Image (cartoon, rainbow, N blue to C red):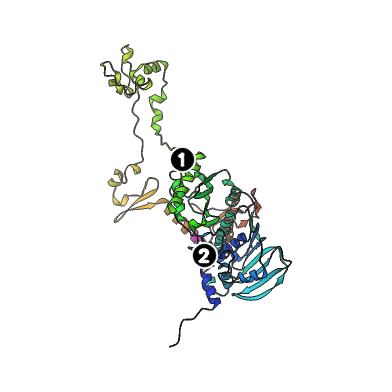
């Protein structure tokens, strides 16, 4: 009987491994940027075409590679960061498995130029589907330039699963921001189709946060810094007013490596408890420094999920550090008092408190029992005590008999009960029950829901959800049938967008035009922090339809 188990060829094995490491262009961007950081680069450029599908190129001024290293780096499990088994428990570099470049070369066409500072010439290597097509000396700058072209050209099924350019570009921007946020001391730039989206100069962590997330965060960041023998925590959290309904401004870094940790995110949410709504997410950029021996980062192909040897300690430390920072900077929730307007109409507030009334109040036994020392617990049991007249504080004035002891306080009539809408006082009021079925009309409950009669009972409609659905149907008809009627606006509105949002907007201009907005995207202008700030102009068209 013939044997049926065979070893896979290297090119097939590399393509299978690439399926775990390189899922989309953003995966390659992450690996190449991390390699540039590990090479000791201080300036890193990312160049893209067609949202990374046609080209992903990373240029750095790092240490570069020798001719032998340039060839070996494309072999599977070839790395300069692991020599012994103990090195796995002391990893401080971004990459260590030696799978990234081998996986990239298995599903794309790669060109590499590299030169060390002590070499007169560099090395050029061209690889196609894991096969070295060319290797020769070349003239190159100190550092490394690696270009990945035509991703998944040899795996059409994988390429067909890629999303639109806008969606893929958003993933790339997310990976770029995570690496750039990890190393504010390095200079980063991102160029897409000849347009520079990011230019981040070297600076402090706060400057990098403001440059990426926006200038409006400059005065709304709270510094977090705690140091212990077990771990260190530093970074920034946003003030409660910066919380958003959507995720996106949450960053956790462990030893400068971006991670996703729902467990630690829950600790941050608990620290902000009662300061922000339960469905909002605070801004935070937090760096945890811990001994690598206490962390296992080799649990996921993308290295974004890690394990701590004692997660409870990490949870408690993060939560307490954020609470301490918020208390230190006097960031506390503001009290929300719901004052009944009827209180303002009471005689005690509207009528003046005359000097005679003040003298009588000071002379009463009730006043003395609360103002004199050691008298608050004393109760006068004498027959002349005025405690039995405590109701006089709230009842109307009695006829005065000329005696100061029988003087009554100014009248304080009880306030009228607060007026509450009938819909909030009862789900179905009397009017609803009296009218016939055919005459029953929908009614509003709590200014949030619509209650309507149906044959089998009643239906409760969420106003907000219903309104969104109506708008969705209207916009959907505008996209599929005839565009909405528009009218020129005298003063067009201008929206300042972050680069990541501008990328999405640029891909949606045709659809926005069908919805009644003029398609115009102005040039990029630099902000004060060095980050380009695209400006999207909704233009001179505005919807003229009702609603």
Q: Position of residue 7 (x, y in %)?
A: 50, 79
Q: Secondary structure at mark 2?
A: helix
Which residue carries the number 2 mark? 85
Q: Is residue 160 visible?
A: no
Q: Answer with mark 1 or mark 2, whichever residue precedes in sequence.
A: 2
Towards the viewer: 288 or 435: 288
Tell which tag, 1 or 2, sits nearer the viewer.
Answer: 2
Disc 1: which residue: 333
* Percent position of residue 165, x then y: 57, 64
**Residue 40 painted magenta:** no
The local secondary structure at tag 1 comes to loop
Disc 1 to disc 2, C-alpha distance: 50 Å
Q: Is residue 237 visible?
A: yes
Pick whichever, 379 or 211, lies toward us: 379
Residue 167's x, y, as percent? 54, 62
Q: Main secondary structure of the magenta part?
A: helix
Check the image and report above or below for 155 versus 257.
below
Q: Residue at x 63, y 73 (%)?
A: 127
414 on left or right of 108: left
Looking at the rendered image, the quarter that the N terminus falls into is bottom left
Above or below for 211 versus 6: above
The magenta segment is 473-479
Residue placed furthest toward the left: 383
Task: Report x, y in % for residue 50.
Answer: 61, 66
């Amino acid at each position: 009987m013939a044997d049926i188990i065979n070893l896979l060829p290297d090119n097939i094995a590399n393509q299978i491994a690439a399926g775990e490491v390189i899922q989309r262009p953003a995966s390659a961007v992450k690996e190449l940027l991390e390699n540039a950081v590990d090479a000791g680069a201080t300036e890193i450029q990312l160049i893209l075409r067609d949202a990374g599908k046609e080209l992903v190129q990373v240029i750095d001024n790092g240490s570069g590679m020798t001719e032998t290293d340039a060839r070996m780096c494309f072999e599977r499990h070839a790395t300069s960061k692991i020599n012994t088994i103990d090195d796995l428990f002391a990893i401080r570099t971004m990459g260590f498995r030696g799978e990234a470049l081998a996986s990239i070369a298995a599903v794309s066409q790669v060109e590499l130029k590299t030169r060390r500072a002590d070499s007169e010439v560099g090395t050029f290597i061209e690889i196609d589907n894991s096969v070295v097509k060319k290797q020769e000396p070349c003239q190159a700058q100190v550092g490394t330039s690696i270009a990945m072209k035509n991703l998944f050209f040899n795996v059409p099924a994988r390429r067909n699963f890629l999303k639109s350019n806008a969606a893929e570009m958003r993933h790339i921007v997310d990976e770029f921001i995570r690496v750039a946020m990890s190393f504010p001391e390095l200079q980063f730039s991102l160029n897409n189709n000849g347009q520079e989206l990011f230019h981040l100069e070297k600076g402090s962590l706060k400057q990098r946060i403001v440059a990426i997330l926006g200038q409006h965060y400059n005065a709304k960041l709270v510094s977090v810094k705690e140091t212990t023998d077990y771990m260190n925590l530093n970074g920034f959290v946003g003030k409660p007013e910066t919380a958003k309904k959507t995720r996106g401004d949450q960053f956790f870094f462990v030893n400068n490596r971006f991670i996703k940790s729902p467990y630690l995110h829950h600790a941050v949410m608990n620290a902000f408890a009662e300061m922000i709504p339960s469905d909002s997410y605070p801004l935070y950029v937090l760096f945890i420094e811990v001994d690598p021996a206490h962390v296992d980062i080799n649990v996921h192909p993308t290295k974004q999920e890690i394990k701590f040897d004692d997660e409870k300690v990490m949870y408690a430390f993060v939560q307490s550090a954020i609470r301490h920072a918020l208390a230190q900077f006097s960031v506390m929730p503001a009290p929300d008092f719901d004052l009944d307007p009827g209180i303002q109409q009471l005689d005690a507030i509207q009528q003046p408190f005359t000097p005679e009334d003040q003298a009588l109040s000071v002379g009463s036994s009730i006043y003395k029992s609360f103002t004199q020392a050691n008298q608050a617990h004393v109760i006068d049991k004498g027959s002349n005590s005025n405690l039995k007249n405590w109701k006089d504080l709230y009842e109307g004035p009695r006829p005065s008999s000329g005696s100061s002891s029988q003087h009554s306080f100014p009248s304080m009539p009880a306030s009228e009960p607060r007026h509450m809408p009938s819909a909030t006082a009862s789900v179905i009021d009397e009017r609803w029950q009296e009218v016939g079925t055919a005459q029953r009309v929908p009614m509003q409950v709590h200014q949030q829901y619509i209650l309507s009669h149906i044959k089998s009972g009643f239906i409760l409609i969420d106003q907000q959800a219903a309104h969104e659905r109506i708008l969705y149907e209207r916009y959907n008809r505008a996209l599929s049938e005839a565009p909405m009627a528009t009218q020129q606006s005298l003063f067009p509105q201008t929206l300042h967008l972050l680069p990541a949002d501008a990328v999405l907007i640029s891909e949606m201009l045709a659809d926005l035009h069908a919805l009644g907005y003029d398609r115009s995207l102005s040039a990029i202008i630099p902000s004060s922090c060095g980050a380009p700030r695209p400006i999207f102009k909704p233009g001179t068209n505005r919807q003229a339809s009702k609603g």
